[in-house]
Structures are given as structure tokens and as C-alpha cells.
Image (cartoon, grey):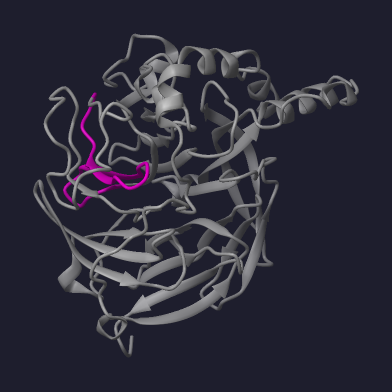
Amino acid sequence: MLGQLCLSAFLLSGCNVIKKYHKVVDEKFAAGRDESGDSSSVLQGQLTPVDRRPFIIHEIAQFNHPMAMSFLPDGTLLVAEKSGQLKLWHPDNKIGVIRNLPDVVSNGQGGLLDIAPHPDFEKNHLIYLSWTESEKLLKEKAALRNGESVDDLSGEDKSAMGAVIGRAELVCDNKGGGRLAGLSVIWRQEPKTEGDVNFGARMTFAPDKSLFISSGDRSQPAAAQDMSINLGKIVRITDIGRIPADNPFNGSSFLKSQIWTSGHRNPLGMAFSPDGRLWENEIGQNGGDKLNLIQKGANYGWPIVTAAAEPSSSTATTPTHPEFTKPKWSWSTSLVPSSLLFYTGNLFPEWKGNAFIGGLASQMLVRMEIKGDKVREADRWPMGHPVRDVAQGSDGALWVLYDDNKGGKLIRLAPPGR
């Protein structure tokens, strides 16, 4: 089935079409920084002193450029590594390997990007993965299946890439690892485009078990306002990849029917708050990182409006475009948000309902207080490493993935003595 789905991908001229159609707008806005935070804007301001951190940092395990993690009901932890490896960490600190992963293109910001268990994982053992693929890889696989030589494709452009969402059954073995069974692709970024940045590709399940996916603009800024494609959007599909009947643009074209919101740049954090509302953070251009409350059918303005020139506040975007939905919070300097978690545990009871955001270039862990529609930054802790992901363990501790030039680490944050 995976081979058939691969053959159905957009393999033709989507990249050239979008480049020509958006050329004028993209030349104006595309020159921004990437996840590494390389720009003239570096996070400044009053940092919370290290000795005021209300937690102890426990180094748990090492990984090779970890991109995402997700706890399973039995307390084990799935960790996705950029190169395409999926590891299973056990509470006794043993680490197993999950086999039968898809072919992953890990150029630039691409790789194995996210992992999420199905809400009914205990019954169906399904997990969802996001990764990046290239047109050339798909064509080579198709040629091999047909018994054709792949040498004829050697001149193709490897940089035509896009994100993919697939689901599979996780079959564990008695050695601490396991394999994926029945992997099938249920969603693709379309069309594939040149370059290897701004994929997004984070996933979160809604209370109704529908799946929300963040889709970056792929450094094609005008794509975020083009409703005929799914770049620069947040999309919503069912757990098997169909279009929910109550999507705001259902009944339009296939790609437009997926869209829940538009006007996004590079959304890397997405989570539901305890009151059931969906929030999202994204990397802006030269500052202007944002925290958005996601509302059905809304347009968040990128690239027509940006909060890059505004001070850090809950009213960062000036109301010059009332047709666009303003962020609930914006940073004028580079946080480079990577992830989003709403805390519901008991280990830090005073933080219940707060949001936690990891920072890449800033190397920060940020705590946000959210009460209704009112948002404020409550704490900002320097961690000394880029923070790739944040999760909550069953014990109420905060778990953090570091990702830097030395590889990466799994960290547990807990109060002293816990």
C-alpha cells in the first residue's frame, strides 16, 4: 500500500509552478533565518538567574539529534532522531530500536520530525510519524519496483522535498525494541518544493480524535495565503487521512478541504490546553515568533503581517489588517520556539494549566501563564542547549530533549528530592 500511495504523490511540476506564481512576494519575504537562529536578532532581555530555577536537571540518556518524543501508556518513551531512527527508552534506562522505518531524507531541517501515539493506543497500538521525503527518492523507489534503472534519474534535483504523515502498528519484542507493521501514508505536503527548511510537520490529536498537522511555508512565504495548496497552514484530517465533514473549507478542492487555518510561517509547537482549545507557536522572520490561539477558518496573516517590529507583549500586532487574527503573544527578538506543552501534573501544582515552550537558538525553556484569552510570559530559564521538545511524564516531571552539535540528551526536570 505504501508503494501505491507513493506513486500517487505530486511528482510533476508543482515546484516550478509555485516558484513562478509567488516569485514577487517570495523575493521580498523569503530572506529570513532558520531554526538555528542565524540572524542579527538574538534573544535579549532580563533572564531568570540559573540559581532561581525551581527544578533539578537530571541527565537521563543520550540520543543522536533527537527531534521529538512521546510517552506511551506503560511509561516507555518513543524518541525520534533526525536521521530516521526511532528509539524506545525504558524506565530502567535501556534503549531499544524500532525497525521498519520509512526512508527519510534528512537534509537541512528535514528528517524524522515527530511521533504521536493514537488516542486509543492501548487498544490499537497505532503510532503516527512525520518525516521528509524527496521527489527523487519517490521516483527511484518506483523505478526499482518496476525493474528499471535508477541511473536515468541521477540528474534530478534532490532538493524537491516535502513532509509526510504516516501511521503504523507498533509491535514490540522481548528485547526492548520492536518494529512497525502496516505503515501507510495518510497525508503529504503538496506540492513539494526546493529547499530544506520550514517543514513544520508537528502533530497533535484533538479530543474528538481528529489529527491536526502543522505545515510550514517551505520558505515560500506567499504559499501561506494560497488556499489551493497546504503549505503555510494548519490542517485537520481524520485518523485515517480523510477530510472531516466539519472542516471550514470542506467541499472545496482536496487540498483546500484539509485546511483549518492559514497564514503560518514555520509552526513547530502545537497542543490543546486543558479547556480543549488548540494553541500553536511558530518561528517568525528576524524575530516575531508568535503564540497563537487557533480558531477555525482563521487567517494569521503571514507574510502580509508580521510581529517582527513589535515589542514582546500580548498585543504585538497592530490592527492594520482586521481580516487577520492577531497572536496572543509575540516576541520581537528570537526565541525560535520548537515545541509546546500544557502542564497538567501534580509535581509542580502551581504550574497547572501553564504552557511550556522550548527555544532552539535562544536555548530557553519558557513558562507562559494563560488565563482565558490573557497570556503573559511568567518565567524564562536558560538551559545551555537548544531545547527541541518538552513533554510531561506520568510522574508529573517535565522531560526535555536537548539537540545540539554534540548530538542530544534526554533530561528530566523535577523539584529537589523528587
10 is higher (above) or lower (below) than 99: above
Please tell me which residue lies in front, 321 or 249.
321
Membership of 291 in magenta stretch? yes
Please tell me which residue lies in front, 26 or 70.
26
| Rendered-image quadrant of the C terminus | bottom left
| Rendered-image quadrant of the N terminus | top right
What residue is drawn where x is 35% and y is 42%? 284
Q: Please provide percent x and percent y for residue 268.
A: 40, 46
129 is higher (above) or lower (below) than 54: above
Q: Quadrant of residue 73?
A: bottom left
Q: Is residue 105 visible?
A: yes
Q: Please provide percent x and percent y for residue 174.
A: 67, 65
Q: Which residues are magenta?
A: 271-297
**Residue 357 horizontal side relative to residue 351, left or right:** right
212 is higher (above) or lower (below) than 282: above
Q: Is residue 242 visible?
A: no
What residue is drawn where x is 56% and y is 76%? 93
Q: Please provide percent x and percent y for residue 248.
A: 26, 19
